[in-house]
Image: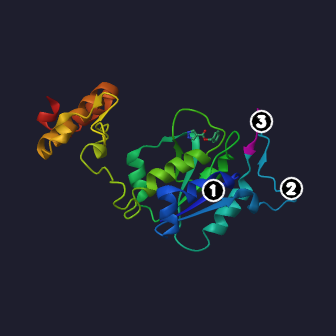
Amino acid sequence: MRIDVLTVLPGLFDCFLKEGVIGKAISSGKVEVKVHNIRDFTTDKHRVVDDVPYGGGPGMVLKPEPIFRAYDELTKEGEKPYVLLTEPWGEKFNQEMAVELSKKPRLMIICGRYEGVDERVKSLVDREVSIGDYVLTGGELPAMVIMDAVLRLIPGVLGNLESLRADSFSDRGLLGYPNYTRPAEFRGMKVPEVLLSGHHKKIESWRKEQSLRKTLERRPEIIENLKRKGLLTKEELE
Ligand SMILES: O=C(OCc1ccccc1)c1cn[nH]c1
């Protein structure tokens, strides 16, 4: 997969693209991520990327020209990218969208900022995406959140280091079960006996029960959704 990011603050991506699983996926060539400074696509001496809003009002708006110039330049060759715009008012990002996006051969992420982008930029955009109902200073962190969730789904990126919790819980959106590792007792807190039993059937059913209980407690709407979709077996329902 190739991802092109358009931003006025490219430096924000430096650590993200170097460290950890994402850094390895890029250095190994499994995925290609290029960050472009929108300012590099301006033509005036002051490299202006924003301007005051028509009709008045507070703040600034990202100008269309530099973004269109960048888009034209970056889409001259290769496949047309699936274009995302990160804004607070977009479609809510979730695991389902991450899975869908991970199947695209090429993505472009335009990072919103200031009061937003000129509306005409939306003619380039396939999906306006929000990572939550709050307002940040820029769409760069949302772009990193989206890239992180998408890239880890690409075959070979996670390797065997981190299992892709492909069990039936996480891909039904159920909350995870409790995790423990050594020592078996720590500051008086013991690991549940069942997990030390080596009895895989018992361990699996304990984990399923824990996952369902936690989901019912914290996110009952997820259980309701699964019920409606008939994605809960009758023993899971009891
Ligand atoms: O704040 C966000 O993006 C930055 C942004 C972009 C455009 C105008 C204002 C702010 C955001 C929140 N969830 N998803 C994105």
Question: In the rendered image, which quarter is residue 59 located in?
Answer: top right
Q: Dot 2 lies on which element?
A: loop
Q: For this rendering, which residue is in front, 11 or 228? A: 11
Instruction: Give the image quadrant in which the ligand numbered 1 is located.
Output: top right
| Residue 210 pos. (x, y %) | 24, 33
Answer above or below: position of 123 versus 40: above
From the image, which quarter does the C terminus lie in?
Answer: top left
Answer above or below: position of 19 versus 77: above
Question: Would you call the spot at circle 3 few (<14 residues within 10 Å), some (14-19), or many (20 or more)?
Answer: few
Instruction: State yes or no: residue 197 in magenta.
Output: no
| Residue 11 pos. (x, y %) | 68, 54
User: Which residue is at a point 17% across and 42% down the rendered structure image?
Assistant: 204
| Residue 74 pos. (x, y %) | 63, 67
Majority secondary structure of magenta residues: loop
Question: Would you call the spot at circle 2 few (<14 residues within 10 Å), some (14-19), or many (20 or more)?
Answer: few
Answer above or below: position of 101 versus 53: below
Q: Is residue 230 visible?
A: no
Question: In the rendered image, which quarter is residue 155 located in?
Answer: bottom left
The residue that label 3 is drawn on is 55
Q: Which mark is residue 46?
A: 2
| Residue 182 pos. (x, y %) | 31, 42
Q: Amino acid at mark 2?
A: His
Is label 2 within 8 A of ligand 1 (CB to nearest ligand atom)?
no
Q: Tell me the magenta residue range.
A: 57-61
**In the image, which is nearer the foreground, mark 2 or mark 3?**
2
Q: Which mark is residue 14?
A: 1
Marks 1 and 3, Cα distance to the nearest angstrom? Answer: 37 Å
**In the image, which is nearer the foreground, mark 2 or mark 1?**
1
Q: For this rendering, which residue is in front, 7 or 43? A: 7
